[in-house]
């Protein structure tokens, strides 16, 4: 199967976020959008400034990163540009 290089990069973009979250101890972690951008290595899309982008929707590539790592977004603090991740119940 041939995957277009740009599409492959997009699909792998959030793996660093997933790996980071998978390696965290505790049940909650709060991160700024800047910290998340540093992890993924590029600017987050404009939609990431809105709560709807942070829904725990496994159909969305970026959400699959944290869901697969065992985390959910508990809260998006739009005014502060911060995301609160919570460990999923097993």
Image: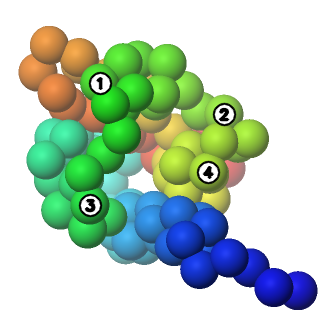
Residue 49 in sight in this render: yes
- For disc 1, the neighbor class at 10 Å (few under 14, some 14 to 19, many from 20) is some
- Please identify the residue farthest to the bottom as the structure is shown: 1
State the separation of the CA atoms marked 4 and 2.
9 Å
Residue linked to disc 2 = 57
Residue at x 13% of width, y 47% of height? 34
> CA separation, marks 1 and 4?
17 Å
Disc 2 is placed on an element classified as: loop
**Of discs 4 and 2, which sits in the foreground?**
4
Q: Is residue 58 above or below residue 19?
A: above
Residue 57 lies, in percent from the top left, at 66, 33
Residue under label 3: 42
Q: CA distance from mark 1 to mark 2?
A: 16 Å
Question: Callout 3: few (<14), some (14-19), or many (20+) C-alpha neighbours within 10 Å?
Answer: few
Residue at 16%, 40% (x, y): give it: 32
Q: Position of residue 1 (x, y in %)?
A: 88, 86
Q: Secondary structure at mark 3?
A: loop
């Amino acid at each position: 199967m041939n995957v277009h290089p740009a599409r492959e990069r997009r699909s792998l973009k959030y793996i660093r976020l997933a790996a980071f979250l998978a390696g965290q101890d505790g049940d909650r972690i709060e991160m700024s959008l800047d910290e998340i951008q540093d992890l993924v290595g590029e600017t987050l899309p404009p939609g990431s400034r809105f709560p709807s982008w942070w829904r725990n929707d496994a159909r969305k590539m970026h959400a699959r990163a944290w869901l697969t790592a065992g985390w959910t977004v508990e809260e998006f603090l739009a005014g502060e540009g911060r995301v609160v991740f919570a460990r999923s119940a097993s």
